[in-house]
Each structure stands twice: as structure tokens, then as C-alpha cells.
Image (spheres, grey):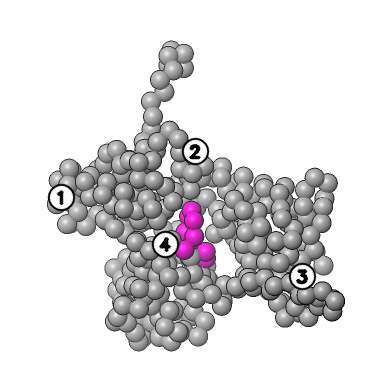
Amino acid sequence: MIIRRIDYDEAAARYADRLDTKLRGFGDDTPWLATWVPDPDPVRGVLSLLEAAAGEGLDALEVVVDRLDPDALRARGRALGALQVEREGERWRVTATGLGDAATHAAETPAAPANRPARPAEPALVRPAEAPLHAAFRARAEALALDHAGHVAGEAIAVGDAEITLRVDGGVVRAAAHAGGGRWSQAAHEAFCRAVIGLPVEEALAHGVHRAMHRLLDPDAGRPVPGVMTPRNASPVFAALADAVGHFTRASALEDSTYAAAPSEAWRALSYDEKLARVRAALRAACGACGIAPEQVEAVSLQGDVRVQIDFADDVPVSRRRAVAMPLEAELQARVEPALRIEREARRDLSPLRRL
């Protein structure tokens, strides 16, 4: 059996580098790593890497990493398969086989000796398919009326035992409906239908799941994950929807979307000072959910109707600025205006030597 090998630290470094060199889509070029986000805790990072591999259908994976707590990884990774953790020079090598086959691995786990009390059971790592919808989405999901339940004549997207249908006319989604699925799935599919109606079909398929996710996200609730939130790491409901939409998109051979939403008429009608005041108030309110103090970031100005220029305090590390920029943007879109985009203010080089 050929086992794929991934250097965790190199993958994390590539991710961090792309935060500076790409505006969007800074995941790995490997398709199943495109939505993976490294974690400061190597145990959590390696586990999420193994979960991503299992979700792609890989049966085995080898990961090398500089720092690791091997006991914590073995305990928390039991549900993923058989893990072998050993030294490789100054680094750790993790070899996972039978990914996702928790039953087989549990049968191979030896019982505690009779003359020694059994160790307290470690909390099982919850597989994505079993995890509930995060609390940050539940209030809006429960309150959402299923106005688009049913079918429309058109394209069908299968999402497990559910189905979403889209009626496309002239390259634009004119109607959408959903049928089947559990309550949380129905709420996600309803939000998706509401989000995509009126959009070009390429944009609907490229970003409809993200739009649905942010429609259900309560800005005042805790975020599902630190840093960049994606359908795959925010909730299994959205991960399943994103997988289904992605499969449909690839089968349709549609081009990438270059669509940019126009600001609403209500937003355009506000004066510059009114817009900036609303942005600043929302930014202060959003800081807690994004893990940054209100005094550490400021909305400096607006460029046009949608570009918000922000500036961070000098004591905020560059890595932290990268991590919170997109979550802050998502919060502003949810709280103020969906078309808003964050830009970091370019600072003038004050060195007289470099400005000769």
C-alpha cells in the first residue's frame, strides 16, 4: 500500500505565506487540503489533517511534524483509525491507517491490566458526520421559515438523502427549492436557496454555501472555529452541502465566478460619515467574537462604497492580523452590509534611506 506523506510544518508555512500573497483561496493546491486550516496546537492540527484525508476517502496518511504530544494524539485520535507515532530524527512521524474505521481500531485497543484501575475514558473525537450544528448557527436555524421547501423544475443537486433544485434562466438562478434532510440540513438548504436566487449561476455555485453559512451565523454568538471559517470546519451540515455543490459544479464544467455583489441602495443612500460610523460600531462589536480587543483594530476610512480600510495596533503580531482579517470582514458583512470588503491600510515607508 502506498501511503501519502505530508510535512505538517511545510504545509502550515505554505498556508501562512499565501495569506500575504493571495486575497482569497489561500489553501493548499491539493484539492482535499484546500479548506484545511493549520492549528497552533500540533495535536489539533494533525487530527484535522487526518480528518480531511478521511473525508476524501484516503485509507492511510503519514504526517511528519516538529512538535507533538504523542500521548495526547493517540488518545484523541482513536476514533480516526490505527495511529503509529514514533520519532524520526528530531521530528515526529505519525502513520495513520484505516482512517475512519473506529470500530476496527477499538477492537485492537488492549484492555487495562486487571491489577490496575482503568484510565478514565478520553473523550472520543467526534467525526464530522456525527457532530451537531454549532450553537452559533442554531438560533437563526430554528427561527428560519422553510419558505422554499419543495421542488422547482431545473437542475438538481443531491445532498445525501436531500435534494436542492435550481431553475436557471439566462445564466441567473431564478428560483430554488429544497426537499428532504434533517432539520439542521433543511435550515442550511433554505438559507442556500434564499442566498442564490437572483445570482449568476457561477456565483451561486461558487459562493452560495458561504453566503448561506453567514446568513445563519449569529454575530453575537461564539464563532465555531478560531481564524478563517469555512463550510468544512464550521459544521458538517455546511461541509456536506459544499461537497455536493462542488461535485455538481465540477460535473457542469462551469467557469470560476468573478461576480462581485453591488452594495444595497439603502447603504448607498447613507453619507460617508454615516457609513463610517456604522462600520466602526460594528467592528467594535465584532472584535470579541474574532478574538481581538477593540482597541487593537480601527476602521480608518472607506474607499468607495464597499472597501473598508483598517489598521491594527503595533502590538498585534502579523500572524494575528492575518488570522482575524477575514473573520472581521465576515462580521461586517453580517452586521452592516454584505458587499463590504476589508483592506489593510498601506503604511507609508518613513525611512529616509529607502525613500531616496
Q: Which residues are magenta?
A: 224-233
Residue 270, disc: 1
Q: Residue at x 31, y 49 (%)?
A: 283
Given the image, on which type of amino acid does mark 2 rest? Pro
Q: Which residue bears the numbered disc 2?
A: 317
Label 3 vs 2, first from the N-terminus: 3
Q: CA distance from mark 3 to mark 2?
A: 38 Å
Instruction: Indicate the secondary structure of the residue bearing disc 3.
Output: strand
Closer to the observer: label 4 or label 3?
4
Q: Are marks 3 and 2 in contact (CB under 8 Å)?
A: no
Label 2 vs 4, first from the N-terminus: 4
Closer to the observer: label 1 or label 4?
4
Q: Which residue bears the numbered disc 4?
A: 222
Task: Kindly tell me whether residue 89 is visible in this rendering.
Answer: yes
The quadrant in which the C terminus is found is top left
Q: Residue at x 52, y 82 (%)?
A: 160
Q: How many residues crowd around disc 2 within 10 Å: few (fewer than 14), some, or many (20 or more)?
A: few
Q: CA distance from mark 4 to mark 3?
A: 33 Å
Closer to the observer: label 1 or label 3?
3
Q: Is residue 225 magenta?
A: yes
What is the magenta segment's predominant secondary structure? loop
Instruction: Indicate the secondary structure of the residue bearing disc 2.
Output: loop
